[in-house]
Amino acid sequence: MTHWSAQDIRYLKGVGPRVAEKLARLGLFVQRDLLFHLPLRYEDRTFISPIGSLQPGQRCLVEAEVLQSAVSFRRGGRSRRVLTARLADNTGMLTLRLFYFSAGQQALLEKGNWLRCFGEVRSAMGALEMIHPEIEAIDAGDPPPLAQTLTPIYPTTEGLHQLSIKKIVGQAIDRLADEGIAETLPQDWLDANQFPGIVGAMLDLHRPGDRRASDLIARNEHPAQHRFAVEELAAHRLALLERRELIRQRKTPRITPAADLQQRLSAALPFTLTGAQQRALGDLTTDFASGKPMIRLVQGDVGSGKTVVAALACLPVVESGYQAALMAPTEILAEQHLRNFSSWLEPLGLEVVCLLGADKGRRRTAKLERIASGESQVVVGTHALFQDDVNFHRLGFIVFDEQHRFGVEQRLALQRKTRDGETPHQLIMTATPIPRTMAMTIYADLDYSQIDELPPGRKPVTTSIVSEQQRDSLVRRVATACADGGQVYWVCTLVEESDALQAEAAEQTYENLVRALPDLEVGLVHGRMKSTRKDEVIQAFKRGDLHLLVATTVIEVGVDVPNASIMIIENPERLGLSQIHQLRGRVGRGARESFCILLVGRALGDLARKRLEIIRSTQDGFEIAERDLEIRGAGEVLGTRQTGEMSFKIADLMRAQHWFAQVEDLARLLQRSESADARAELLRNWIGERQDYTNVG
Ligand code: ADP
Ligand code: MG
């Protein structure tokens, strides 16, 4: 007989076909899935907050009397009715607003009634209000009892009410309490770590017990939370490690060493490689020699010289009769890579081509032909490399610059581009430091090298925080620096991701600066310009024909102009710390003393100031990433695009720092365990159908 926990969710009360469809969207199919559908957060409805003590942003329970209520009309006609009620307890006043309401709700809010409301407190024009709180009429002399424990709030989906999902999950929890389920982790390991068993831990999280248990949960310190977080992280690590093993069993191009060519390129460079660059190159050489697909992440702070390492790694690939591709996140960067690669590789007799989205018509056809025939041995480009009509002759090696994680489509497209079922070697380069907890979990499928040394002669960048009121004196400082032969970046940021708005802000700033600095040559680049135009402007800046370059964050990665020594970043509080650090890496590359000036608005909050202070006080990219992770979480540090589908039910990477050893230990234990079924079940419980995310193809 099927164990209850493996039974279809549709046997439960309240789950018809339509609800089942919605539950499927949440990855919930059988009853055990409901157990692992853990509360997203908890609400505390165990006490009444006096209105006088409310703070905006809190979610609270209040009890108060309706002093008056009225229906008014917003602009836009009769359909825009608003029901407003004024409430008071003996400590203060609170306004309720309902933008849609039934006759029943209107009756509930009649003058003289006593209400119990739960909702988020907001501040509107100096007064406190709640919009669409949960409302219950009470008898002031005999109010109903309060909840004794925290109220769990479940992740849900559109069209599925919180109360509905709570009832559905509740049925599975009832059965869990009566009939139990088998333990998922080795008992010895649980005992050794003093972790609770699965049934008790599940019950604790779905139905928090007494006050003490609730307090622990509210502080994220309950042993059940700890157990499941470690279990979840270990499951993710295991999934990625297993996937890595599968990939490593695939056929891959045989690459033979090309020490001669590498020697010739090194000799032609105007510098010698740093020890760290040599070590990274050594790792790549070892990978090629292993006969297994390379899947390696090379991290090196901005300016550590990753590009030349990638170029050197292309040589044995080409010598072995394969093509190498380098994918950059932006056209500006692709074109810069093209120039470097051409100047390094063409003297050795290699053909380098650059393919961009902007390549159209005959020019595109010609490039595609040379790529398909194999005459172009090294292909540089953007996402355009993945388009359907791009066929490689024999792709053996692909370098992803400044991008950690790829969409499923890109990976499939990449597979289609290889021949004979061969998996190309893959190198991923990033300046964003990978905190240890991330390396352990979300990058577990990658080998890892670090270029932890900057080329000699780099100057530290002095960073300061300057307020908007000092803009005029800042502009004068720019004028002086440029008169002195220096060059300056002026970076504009906007909250919206929209290119159009960013471009507009940059254009406005550009016009103001052109007017304020009539003696200087000022250029503008933003994401909405044609790539040829962008490139012209950047080239002019590189040649020194422009003093001042106004830009959006398109210049964040890679742009290399050693003479530029001042960078001004407007509204830096809108960016992630690692992003600011990347931008700052554009200066401090030449002989001049360099400055980064963070130009902030008047009303900078405490938290924002604290974050910028981190940037000001350190140039250690690792420290910045760790602190950013603490403050904002992984998705923000790496960008959502880069964390992709990766999300956790209960673990968070910030706390995971303390669990490092436990996660690794558990993953190792499970990996060695005999029972493939137990492993499969663990992955199903924690990752479910979302097995699509990984870092490699
Ligand atoms: P990133 O690691 O940020 O991609 P780049 O590869 O763009 O850095 O290198 C930054 C600059 O440093 C480039 O101008 C590059 O030519 C130069 N460079 C690279 N390696 C060295 C080195 N060993 N010594 C001196 N300069 C170097
Ligand atoms: Mg780079």
Image (cartoon, rainbow, N blue to C red):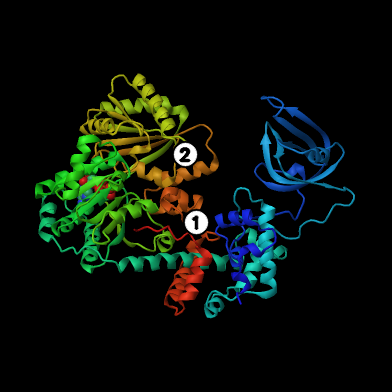
Q: Secondary structure at mark 1?
A: loop
Query: Which residue shows up at 76% across the image and 33% down it?
Result: 84
* Quadrant, the C terminus: bottom left
Marks 2 and 1, how far apart at CA: 23 Å
Of tags 2 and 1, the one toward the viewer is 1
- The one nearer the camera, 158 or 264, is 158
Residue 574: mark: 2
Judge whether residue 62 can be spotted in this image.
Answer: yes
Judge whether residue 406 can be spotted in this image.
Answer: no
Q: How many marks?
A: 2
Amino acid type at mark 2: Arg
Residue 502: mark: none
**Would residue 174 appear left or right of 650 to someone viewing this image?**
right
- The one nearer the camera, 623 or 163, is 163
Q: Position of residue 332 (x, y in %)?
A: 28, 38
Amino acid type at mark 1: Ser
For mark 1, what is the residue?
647
- The one nearer the camera, 622 or 320, is 320
Query: Which residue shows up at 13% across the image and 60% down it?
Result: 258
Q: Position of residue 179 (x, y in %)?
A: 67, 75
Q: Secondary structure at mark 2?
A: helix
Q: Considering only order in the chain, which callout, 1 or 2, is on the residue closer to the N terminus?
A: 2
Task: Residue 488: name its quadrant.
Answer: top left
Task: Residue 163: name its quadrant.
Answer: bottom right
- Mark 1 Cα shell of 10 Å, populated few (<14), some (14-19), many (≥20): some
State whether residue 470 is above or below residue 593: above
Q: Position of residue 320 (x, y in %)?
A: 15, 60
